[in-house]
């Protein structure tokens, strides 16, 4: 009987205490007149407490007179009484309605752009692309036409295979499927040479078509002809062909690094100072004043967008800035320590620059120079790598 | 009256709708619902006596409350100890 309780609450009810000798008669008269009594409780022989609807109170008074009962109101409840209680608080009402209107109007706009499925493409590039199409934070939802937007992105970028755009709450979700690179198609009818694009020493030659013009152990420069697109036959004579082949060469990469013998080392002391900020779109409010008292410090900023549900972002952003105190310490290194450190670092740098495109790592050597306070290390890495680019021949 | 009941029986209507016999529903031992009642004869903390068209219903218990009194429904809640009926028909015969 939840419905009857809800209607009682909605129409307003009073809890009355009924006192008299003929309580049974009172209840029976109420029943026959169709008055709804709820939660009737017996207190003693002549007294009961019951909830009745606000509108039935008049008729109850009549019945009480007939049965010679006394009526006393204990409590008033329900929505009409609450409204009556707050009727003079106009500002409260105005602010409440203003809040509701604000909430509804704010959700008409886009407050967050989410990009999904990107690995090689940078998110900032796509956001810039969207900004060029007049899609920014704070644009109205109705202005976004996802089909047009999708077509626009597809036209401008050819490294995207599929784009989907949808609006969820105040969140614009752009899903992207990146296109894989197409494999190069070798045109066998084309006549070309292979020339070197790096400086090194040839280690291995494996020619599939064409004639090799270098031998193992030859030093090659940039632009040296490696394979010529020519086939010589005993009976056929000389004819031009498409040249294909893998040629490997030892290539040396050098890198230089410097380091001081007595260096300043940074150390966290563990002291922290937090500062909080609130952003309303672009309007900034600092919650606590001042900057940290630390002499040397690192700052770490972290932003968080405020949202109601998973997709209802609001243009409110919290920012927490953490200042971490740093102590500077002087430290002296020996020459050996520092050279070893530098060597490892430089080698790593060189190999990571090659991005695993090399075939074999052969050797590495290093030169160390010590000045009064500085150590200079030069690292030479020797790597076996595939060389050669195609050079088309035009007749 | 009897004709109406016969038709109701044929059409398989619930009896409490066709005639004014009470329907008593007891949920656990703490809630008792009577449909088609006439009036309340006595109401006290430990004893409720309800009149229906075919007799009286006596309810004994503790802390008995009357919930949702309507024109034809009444719900008695509280600790119910025992219920007995006083049928009019038995007295007549």
Image (cartoon, rainbow, N blue to C red):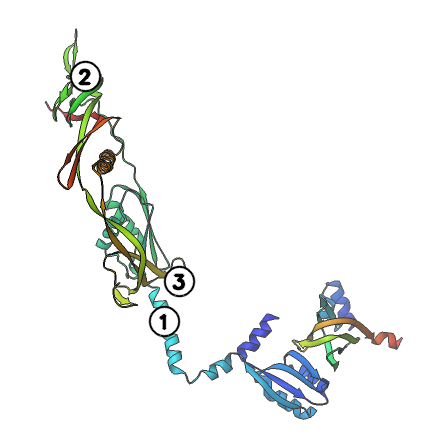
Please state if B52 lies on the left or on the right of A152 as rendered. right
Q: Which residue is mark 2?
A: A216
Which quarter of the figure has residue B71? Answer: bottom right
Mark 1 or mark 3, which is nearer to you?
3
Is disc 2 placed on a helix, strand or loop? loop
Asked if one can make out residue A110 in the rendered structure from this viewpoint, the answer is: no
Label 1, on which residue?
A101
What secondary structure is marked by label 1? helix
Front label number (3 vs 2): 2
- In the displayed structure image, the side of residue A147 where residue A250 appears, left or right: left
Q: Could you tell me which residue is drawn at 45 percent across and 82 percent down?
A: A86
Residue A315 locus on image (x, y percent): 31, 63
| Residue A220: percent from left, percent from top | 13, 22
| Of residues A384 and A56, the one drawn nearer to the viewer in this rendering | A384
Determine which residue is flagged by label 3. A308
Placement of the N terminus of chain A among the 4 image quadrants: bottom right
Question: Would residue A269 be found to the left or right of residue A10 on screen?
Answer: left
Q: Secondary structure at mark 3?
A: loop
- N-terminal of the two: label 3 or label 2? 2
């Amino acid at each position: 009987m939840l419905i009857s309780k809800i209607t009682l609450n909605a129409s307003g009810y009073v809890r009355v205490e009924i006192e008299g000798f003929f309580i049974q008669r009172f209840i029976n008269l109420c029943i026959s007149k169709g008055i709804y009594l709820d939660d009737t409780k017996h207190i003693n022989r002549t007294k009961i407490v019951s909830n009745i609807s606000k509108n039935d109170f008049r008729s109850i008074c009549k019945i009480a007179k007939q049965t010679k009962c006394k009526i006393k109101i204990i409590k008033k409840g329900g929505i009409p009484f609450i409204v009556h209680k707050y009727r003079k608080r106009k500002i409260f009402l105005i602010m409440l309605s203003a809040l509701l209107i604000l909430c509804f109007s704010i959700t008409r706009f886009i407050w967050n752009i989410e990009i999904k499925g990107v690995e090689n493409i940078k998110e900032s590039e796509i956001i810039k692309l969207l900004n060029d199409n007049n899609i920014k934070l704070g644009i109205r939802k109705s202005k976004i036409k996802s089909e047009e937007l999708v077509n626009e992105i597809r036209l401008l970028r050819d490294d995207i295979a599929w784009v989907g755009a949808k609006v969820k709450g105040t969140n614009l979700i752009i899903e992207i499927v990146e296109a894989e690179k197409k494999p190069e198609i070798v045109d066998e009818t084309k006549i070309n040479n292979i020339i070197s694009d790096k400086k090194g020493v040839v280690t291995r030659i494996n020619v599939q078509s064409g004639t090799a013009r270098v031998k193992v152990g030859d030093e090659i420069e940039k632009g040296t002809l490696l394979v010529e697109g020519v086939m010589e036959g005993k009976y056929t004579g000389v004819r031009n062909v498409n040249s294909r082949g893998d040629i490997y060469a030892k290539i040396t990469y050098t890198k230089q690094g410097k380091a001081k013998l007595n260096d300043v080392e940074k150390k966290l002391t563990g002291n922290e100072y937090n500062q909080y900020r609130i952003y309303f779109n672009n309007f900034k409010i600092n919650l606590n004043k001042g900057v940290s008292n630390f002499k040397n410090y690192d700052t770490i900023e972290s932003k968080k967008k405020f949202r109601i549900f998973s997709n209802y972002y609001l243009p409110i952003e919290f920012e927490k800035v953490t200042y971490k105190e740093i102590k500077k310490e002087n430290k002296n290194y020996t020459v050996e320590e520092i050279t070893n450190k530098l060597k490892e670092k430089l080698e790593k740098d060189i190999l990571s620059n090659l991005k695993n495109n090399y075939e074999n790592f052969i050797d590495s050597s290093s030169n160390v120079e010590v000045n009064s306070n500085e150590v200079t290390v030069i690292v030479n890495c020797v790597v076996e790598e595939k060389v050669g680019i195609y050079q088309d021949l035009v007749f | 009256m009897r004709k109406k009941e016969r038709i109701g029986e044929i059409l398989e209507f619930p009896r409490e709708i066709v005639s004014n016999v009470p329907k008593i529903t007891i949920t656990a031992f703490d809630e008792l619902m009577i449909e088609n009642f006439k009036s309340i004869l006595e109401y006290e903390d430990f004893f409720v006596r309800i009149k229906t068209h075919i007799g009286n219903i006596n309810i004994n218990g503790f802390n008995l409350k009357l919930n949702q009194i309507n024109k034809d429904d009444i719900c008695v809640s509280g600790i119910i100890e025992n219920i007995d009926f006083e049928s009019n028909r038995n007295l007549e015969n």
